[in-house]
């Protein structure tokens, strides 16, 4: 429509590989030109970005919208969660399809239904919770026909989503054969189960029991295990929600040796510590419950350091919001508190404030860790993750001299609490453009359900580059 | 008998904590006095040890005599294996009782039967291969009534001895409650199984396939996992046959943090490398097959370094000898080659030559790693592992100016091959005294079946010291 | 001139951030357009690159052309060395200006003179060998007026170039205040001196004495020291010629913590091992002498792993070629063998073959480590290091299906030996375009002296981003 | 005298290698017998130790009594400091002789004079602050004729005690040739100097500036450097006052590789953190000033873990007490605050409470880290550090059910403050016997000046064992 001609004038256009002062011209949802001093007709809406940063919209690699979990469903659905995202400068997310009774196809159909109300672009990962010939065949179908290029394995949630090493090995091999990326939730589920029993036996039933029952050592263990098994199969691995020094150091060690491992910290792990879990008010304490747990002070700072130098690569949220009434399911037993925190709306601002304003990363790095690297890993770059001619017009304008404040009253998520309540910082995303349309401006979200598109993610991302050659080289070395 | 009065004169008596020139007087199988210039009567046999080292007899913490395994039985039984041990200066060993159909008691009875022909002192560890109320109860019985203070868990041998993490956690808790030491064979059995299939699919059926199918990363993984789970339970852990840098570094990391982890290298891992497995002669190559595999050059040297500074603590053998006819079961498929190498006779000489003669450890350290530390860990020190008044008279005399040579023709094991074939070195154990009797002298073993004693090993060794206080301190920190 | 209109058709254009099939149009030495299916006039020379890779010309961050050193001068001057570079696909290098009697200005003048015969673009680093007010002032002059943004400190070469920690600290502070990058040659010069004396005393005078006198531990020590002092000053550090696991691991550790450290392996360190130094032929052995020494087998493979994941960032050569007659100065004393190996011509081919053909890195990574990262670090990106509209037309065309072979007969360096003699591999740079002119085609170099340009490198590269904010944040934390 | 016959009855006698219930009989300052149920005559004083631990008196490896330093002299001299030591269960210490104008002999004479008032046994280390032929010769004299077997090198205190790498290398070689142990104070003195200037420039003149000016990274740097240079020379190294994780991890890494490095934490580093330095009261804050500084919370706990497993080996104090009037020299400039804390009296109680009562080490370990290991390292075991027949009668009796409290009012040091003020804990040393005399009983010290003896420490301790063989083996590998 005619409304989709836009010119963003005079800003500093920032890509992960370069930044420069330039104008950006958008037409029909696509970036048409990026050049200084573009001339356009009168029918073009002009947005002045002078003194501001014009950047690719954020991509959140890790969300759970409308997820059925622990006997309830996360409160943000594909409309409310996405609206919140857009208000926070995120223009795409990748959600996890959970199989229905083990069926990938049935799970995908359920998520396609959930996603009909989408108001921004989205992609899917798929969880694998059992393995047999049907799952194996369906993995091929979803990769080749359904646009999914990543499968997640849970090493925790014993009795529910958890897989054992035998299944993980089968899954890693199948991922490799399909060019799909294996992802892991890395905690030792058997030990977590043991830790939970221990806490209950000790009479510790409150939210602090959540942290105490699954300490960093269990995350470190599972991360080390998954990395080594992926190395044994020689296939890339993506570790979701790296929450601890223990896990990060395993990733660093593997990467030093040349192994292809990606580490995703989440914003809660980067900027919070576990003290909230000891709050005497259950409503307050319980909102911090997620898995792996938010860790003691010191872990977040270490994760920031690793992120700044590419030891960790991209920032997600694990956005999985529950209301305080849902969190209250666990008032007598922390094991029943639905696991999850918000973040889809706050991620971009918090990463900017924590990492850029503190001097830890550059603005090009900001784009890299919030958008470009995600697009590269899920193989949709430069359609997403870049402001270059031909890319989708998913763009944000950030004013570094303005500031933000977070609270549950004003946020766009449906949840009635916010784990970042009261937090302020520098940098404000003033405009979000998604698919060429201005969807966030003047502190207002303007979207309609159904306007979001499903983005297919093709297999064989850059992490697979050369895997075949390395295998061939290994095999020939055997003779 | 009157023949048991001995005076060892003029040698340098070496204990782990001190060495000095002194005489040693033995009566009735017990060391009676250790002092310079002892005067004795005419009825005392005097052995001149001038210029030689008088040391506690070796204790091998890790053997498999007469073990039924992989469809056959290891060729050295409790007589031949022990005779070989005595010829090499080892006066006690601890063997692994394997349950019969999961029954600990039945397994123990079988081993008591096997051990009737013993000609030297021995103790037992017990393997745990399943876990239920009966096993749990029997663990208590064998600890409290049968003199066993250590239980071994196999993380490899899928479909046979292997346990999963749930069982391992139960086992660790049970060990802790009994004051028994948990031991692990640390390789990831699921991945080994996968690696074996892969090699066969690649057409690699020879002994080299054994090494290729279970690389160091799988030992590192399982070692890391066992250590972290033991840390989570807060109980001591003993890692048997540490064969790789990968495993050793996990132990070092844990120990640096204060965790109680013991690492046992075995002599084959210290002094051999994997090149033999590529020998074109099957009989030669197959004799090196043991698990975890003997590693590439470099691992052994690193293990020696760690041993020299107490990062690893004591040296075993995993002596489990098979004849070439038994090894030939796997002529078409390395998976069928019985796993095991000799070592019970060679250990003391090889550790001396490799560690002391090279200048890496002192002679007191030699005593520590071959005898004293084993006695301390299995809680029989100073009855064993020391030359002090009151200790059992298990004594060796080593001549540092003499030399040894190893070959299958002259060794005392029943096996027809020797993985150390042709090896020579400095230092010769000229006399072995076991239970106060000279059993090895002038290159001759003099023993009769049935002369060995079962040594009960009590629970709550020194590694348990303070565990209760640390637990109490943790618990009180929770409130 | 009319000769400068070029169209490179149908190739895969590879930038560090993206690759795509496109045409590249060049005019007046500048890349004018990068798009599929460009239409051009008849006056444009068209080069068919179908099936080939069109990539930014290599940039060698570390060379020593016409360097006076150890009583002689490296044989490749700014013409012959650059001609060799172009034949190997490198279109720019950065050489080290050595002060004259401690004077930076005099040193720069001498190098400006040397560089008059240049046939390709070049930049300068500057060595700092003493520190006083004049040096301090001259550092400012060369940064602000002379286009130099990097200063190198030698922790080795005692009695010649070496600086002590006091000077290094002053230098680091001065670099920081100017936005200039500090570089270090990291070996402990005092210990090297000691090691050299020791070898001579032992009667080891041959080239192997070079390696034995300065083992990896001395490189690890100096690397650790320089990194920690740079961290203490909070200024970025660039470690030249990382040759050992020891040094690499120090860099990895610092980067994991968020410190800004760049590690430059050189091609000799990546692909060679030290066995050549033991060659009984002095002429052969001596050609491998460089500092730090080429290391034992294993180090190169580890450096490759680190390079593949960005633990190390870019590949140099330390090209400093000497003839066998010059190497013969040290026939009786390895300390007199001029230190240096060739590489400026071979780098691109060897990195391709070793890293890309083996499956360790992707083609975009190849561009990153051979060109783009160097341009970014020395702050001349995207003028250099990219194939995008507006960049200098420094371009290579590599045929992945062709192959290369290296030998002294056919190379373009003036030296009469080659440390890669006889090496073959896949991938052949068939065309080099420098400044918009085809300078290498049909195995022929076509250049004239004086056609190269000096490229000024501005201060405050991306590594300085946020340093001020981090400092401010630290200071405010003190109160 | 007749008063020197003692029988300590019924206690648990604890040596580093073993503990048992036994009586201890002492005559003429020597332990005569250690056996259960000893019978003695009426002239023997009997001390009932039932339910208590009878242990070797503590040996403090690191003290500075009557030291002239920073323009003043530490307040505890060889009488008051030793009296305090005895009251705390320490029966020997080793003090550092500081050369006079570089002269070792003059320094030694001065210390012999200071030591005339000694009331307990003591030994000497010697500092080396310059190196020339005279120093080299004098090193030989003090080793061979004066009973000193250890030399300390300061890598900090620029302009005063500090040595550079060239001197350190000479010193390490000289130590090796004499069989003397090299010790280092490991901080980078150039960087400390820089850090001090920086703090003053920032207007930070208070005691917190002390910590801020010399952060852990500078201790880690110097520790790494000293270790690697000692490794290069292949001589043992003793790192005094290990205060940080950074330094400890360097020691752990070296030990893992087999290098002979000893790490000495001091009690202040184990049990305090740096928060006191920020106390707004100068008198309070300044008493914590020592070098390297007491570190932030977390370091101490990590050092405890390393100590518990032998990664660090023995505990010292660096006792160097100054009055508040002396500390006040630096009221306007932290650089002038005399560096040093008390500890000689508190060490044994604090190690017991922190390590044994918390369950981190056993009682035998307690003896090892407070006494035996020190005796072994300084080559006076088993004369010191053991309760066996023939050892010096330096004995303490600790009541585990009693408790201690520390404060400046009741302590025996002359200083008017105590860095452990108000600290209480379990375990009380009720009796100290030194040289066979009861010197501490019923909370009373009974000693006279001049009753202490100088203990000569012979060269070639156990750390030198095999160094010659390792060197020979390296040399033969070169050919
Ligand atoms: Zn998860
Ligand atoms: Zn999740
Ligand atoms: Zn085993
Ligand atoms: Zn075994
Ligand atoms: Zn250099
Ligand atoms: Zn160079
Ligand atoms: Zn000191
Ligand atoms: Zn001191």
Image (cartoon, coloured by chain):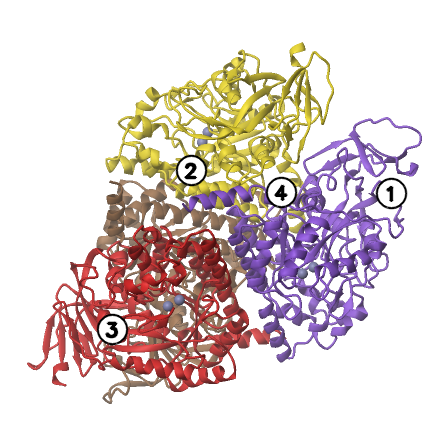
Chain colours: A purple, B red, C yellow, D brown
Viewer-nearest residue: A170 or C388: A170
Q: How crowded is mark 3: few (under 14 residues within 10 Å), some or many (20 or more)?
A: many
Q: Taking A384 as reference, is C387 above or below it? A: above
Q: Residue at x 73, y 38 (%)?
A: A386
Residue C187 circle label: 2
Q: Residue at x 41, y 55 (%)?
A: B245
Residue C104 percent across, percent down from the top left? 51, 23
Residue B144 percent across, percent down from the top left? 41, 85
Numbered disc in front, either 4 or 2: 4
Residue D53 visible within the image: yes
Find the distance from the CA under tag 3 to the CA under tag 2.
Answer: 54 Å
Same chain, marks 3 and 4? Answer: no
The residue carrying mark 3 is: B82
Q: Is residue B21 left or right of residue C345?
A: left
Residue at the front extreme?
A: B332
Q: Mark 1 lies on which chain?
A: A
Q: Taking B242 as reference, is C142 above or below it? A: above
Numbered disc in front, either 2 or 1: 1
Q: Is residue C241 left or right of residue C339?
A: right
The residue carrying mark 1 is: A438
Same chain, marks 4 and 2? Answer: no
Q: Is mark 4 within 8 Å of ligand 2?
A: no
The residue carrying mark 4 is: A462
């Amino acid at each position: 429509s005619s409304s989709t001609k836009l010119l963003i004038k005079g800003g500093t256009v920032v890509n992960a590989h370069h930044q420069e002062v330039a104008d950006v011209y958008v037409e029909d949802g696509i970036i048409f030109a990026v050049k200084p001093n573009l001339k356009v007709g009168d029918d073009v809406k002009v947005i002045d970005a002078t003194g501001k940063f014009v950047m690719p919209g954020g991509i959140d690699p890790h969300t759970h919208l409308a997820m059925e979990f622990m006997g309830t469903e996360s409160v943000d659905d594909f409309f409310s969660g996405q609206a919140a995202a857009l208000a926070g400068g995120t223009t795409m997310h990748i959600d996890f399809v959970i199989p229905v009774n083990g069926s990938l196809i049935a799970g995908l159909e359920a998520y396609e239904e959930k996603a009909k109300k989408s108001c921004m672009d989205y992609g899917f990962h798929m969880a694998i919770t059992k393995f047999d010939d049907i799952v194996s065949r369906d993995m091929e179908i979803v990769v080749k026909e359904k646009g999914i290029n990543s499968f997640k394995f849970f090493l925790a949630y014993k009795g529910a989503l958890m897989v054992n090493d035998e299944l993980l090995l089968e899954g890693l091999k199948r991922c490799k054969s399909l060019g799909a990326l294996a992802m892991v939730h890395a905690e030792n589920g058997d030990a977590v189960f043991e830790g939970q029993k221990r806490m209950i036996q000790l009479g510790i039933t409150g939210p602090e029991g959540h942290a105490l029952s699954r300490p960093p050592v269990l995350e470190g263990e599972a991360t080390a295990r998954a990395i080594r098994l992926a190395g044994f199969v020689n296939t890339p691995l993506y570790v979701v929600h790296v929450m601890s020094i223990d896990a990060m150091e395993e990733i660093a060690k593997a990467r030093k040796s040349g192994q292809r491992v990606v580490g995703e910290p989440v914003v809660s792990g980067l900027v919070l510590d576990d003290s909230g879990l000891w709050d005497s008010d259950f409503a307050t304490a319980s909102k911090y419950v997620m898995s792996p747990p938010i860790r003691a002070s010191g872990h977040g700072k270490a994760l920031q350091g690793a992120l700044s130098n590419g030891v960790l690569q991209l920032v997600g949220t694990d956005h999985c919001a529950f209301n305080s009434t849902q969190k209250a399911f666990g008032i007598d037993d922390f094991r029943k508190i639905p696991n999850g925190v918000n973040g889809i709306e706050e991620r971009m601002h918090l990463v900017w404030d924590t990492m850029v304003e503190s001097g830890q990363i550059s603005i090009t790095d900001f784009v890299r860790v919030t958008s470009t690297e995600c697009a590269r890993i899920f193989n949709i770059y430069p359609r997403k993750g870049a402001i270059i001619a031909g890319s989708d017009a998913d763009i944000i304008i950030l004013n570094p001299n303005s500031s933000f404040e977070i609270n549950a009253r004003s946020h766009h998520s449906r949840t009635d609490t916010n784990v970042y309540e009261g937090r302020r910082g520098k940098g404000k995303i003033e405009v979000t453009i998604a698919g060429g349309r201005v969807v966030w401006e003047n502190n207002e979200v303007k979207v309609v359900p159904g306007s979001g598109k499903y983005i297919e993610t093709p297999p064989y991302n850059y992490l697979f580059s050369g895997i075949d050659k390395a295998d061939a080289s290994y095999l020939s070395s055997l003779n």
